[in-house]
Amino acid sequence: MPMNDDPSAVVLLKKLLSQSHILGGLVVSPDGTVEYSELPPEADVHLIGALGATLFSNNNVTLQRMDRGSVMQMVLQTDQGLFMFHELDGRLLVILADSESNLPNLMRLIEGD
């Protein structure tokens, strides 16, 4: 797919993949369909996509019941690194980073676009 036809989430993901400590990422539709991915070979693309879609959906329902708006971004930090989930133009951008990644810098890169 030519770059100018890519959704903005794909364009941003391709930019982020050039950053140090970024292991990969994917773009997921609201129904959990993986639209684009560049992940390490051992990563389960569909499992990560389903995780992101489920987390966003469930947390959005809860937040709306609490009258607190919608989820825009979530971070799961593990002992091996982090998953960052970011809503962008109706799609979910998922970034995998290693444990040396700088979360504030990553957030600035994502929010700057």
Image (cartoon, helix red, strand yellow):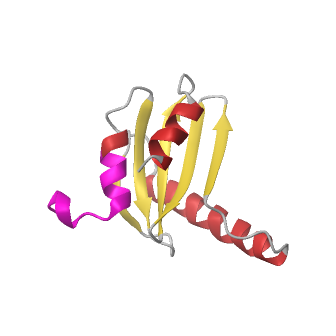
Which residue sits furthest right?
Answer: 66
Residue 36 visible in image: no
Q: Magenta part mainly helix, strand or loop?
A: helix
Q: Position of residue 38 (x, y in %)?
A: 33, 47
Q: Name the residue located 66 percent from the left edge and 44 percent from the top edge.
A: 76
Question: Residue 46 or 2: which is nearer the viewer?
Answer: 2
Which residue sits furthest front?
Answer: 112
Q: Which quadrant of the view contains residue 1?
A: bottom left
Q: Position of residue 37 (x, y in %)?
A: 35, 53
| 15 w.r.t. 45: above or below | above
Which residue sits furthest top?
Answer: 100
Residue 28 visible in image: yes
| 30 w.r.t. 23: above or below | below
With 90 as the anchor, is 68 left or right in this view? right
Q: Position of residue 93 (x, y in %)?
A: 46, 56
With 77 as the anchor, is 40 left or right in this view? left
Q: Name the residue located 33 percent from the left edge and 57 percent from the top edge.
A: 10
Q: Name the residue located 54 percent from the left edge and 63 percent from the top edge.
A: 50
Q: Position of residue 13 (x, y in %)?
A: 36, 49
Question: Residue 75 or 107: which is nearer the viewer?
Answer: 107
Q: Is 51 inside the magenta-drawn segment?
A: no
Residues in magenta, as a range: 1-14
Question: Residue 17 or 48: which is nearer the viewer?
Answer: 17
